[in-house]
Amino acid sequence: MHELLELHELVTFKSLCLTKALIMQKLVTDGELKAIMQQDVTMTSRHIEDLKNHLT
């Protein structure tokens, strides 16, 4: 049960980070930084999906 709660907390945190990255990405004008942020968004989305799979 404890591990399940920890995973749920991690998914919540990652989702918050993803939302922040998506919003901040729209404000960035530097192309290189925008590309790095897009990679982060892609990776974080994959991590969230992996974590959700462990929850089910």
Image: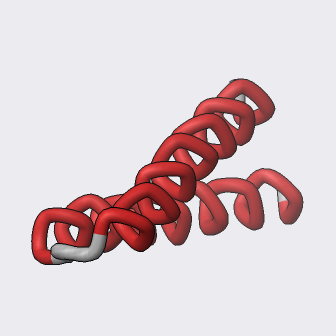
Q: Position of residue 9 (x, y in %)?
A: 61, 67
Q: Closer to the camera, 24 or 54? A: 24
Position of the N terminus, as image quadrant, is bottom right
Position of the C terminus, as image quadrant, is top right
Q: Which residue is rendered at x = 58% and y = 51% of the image?
A: 44
Name above or below for residue 6 compared with residue 29: above
Name above or below for residue 26 compared with residue 24: above
Q: Position of residue 13 (x, y in %)?
A: 52, 70
Q: Closer to the camera, 42 or 52? A: 42
Q: Position of residue 25 (x, y in %)?
A: 25, 66
Name above or below for residue 30 compared with residue 32: below
Q: Closer to the camera, 42 or 13? A: 42
Task: Tell whether 34 sits left or right of 22.
Answer: right
Q: Which residue is rendered at x = 51% and y = 63% of the image?
A: 36
Q: Which residue is rendered at x = 78% and y = 52% of the image?
A: 4
Q: Which residue is rendered at x = 17% and y = 74% of the image?
A: 29
